[in-house]
Amino acid sequence: MSAEPSFTFYTYSSAVEPLEARWRDDGVGDAFFGNADAARAAIEELRDAVANEPGHDCPSMRLERIETVPVTRDAFLALLNDGVGSIVRNYDIIDTIGGN
């Protein structure tokens, strides 16, 4: 087992996004949080902002938990060069929030 630490973070994505495309670099940055409550609050804030925009509906959002690979020098280089998906060891959808 590696002596380097792994970490658990939380994030969210639109439920209309195909799962197989989840960690592709699409130029839109992800927001990451240290706990599920903070991520859930960000989803609610986003949903409220979209609800106030005329003609816009907020799709269902996936609350996600990721666990990183051990954070080694090589893992950090992969993160910088290849994006977040390169350091995700485990990925779970822990809730789906809202809908149109």
Image: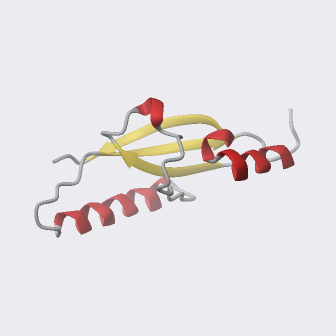
Left or right of 6: which side holds 13?
A: left
Nearer to me, 97 or 79: 79
Q: Residue at x 67, y 40 (%)?
A: 86
Does 6 appear above or below 92?
below
Residue depicted at x 86% and y 37%: 2
x then y, percent, for residue 30: 50, 55
- In this picture, is 30 found above or below 62? below
Q: Look at the image and name its color scheme.
A: secondary structure
Q: Name the image quarter holding residue 18.
A: top left
Q: Is residue 3 left or right of residue 17?
A: right
**How many discs appear?**
0
The x and y percentages for residue 93 are: 44, 37
Quadrant of image for the N terminus? top right
Considering every residue shown, the one lying at the far top of the view is: 20
Residue 75 left/right relative to 43: right
Drawn side of residue 96 relative to residue 55, left or right = right
- Judge by depth and name the residue closer to the eye, 95 or 89: 89
Q: Position of residue 36 (x, y in %)?
A: 47, 53
Residue ID at (43%, 39%)? 94
Q: Residue 71: image x %, image y %?
A: 78, 47
- Which of 27 and 87 lies nearest the eye of the viewer? 27
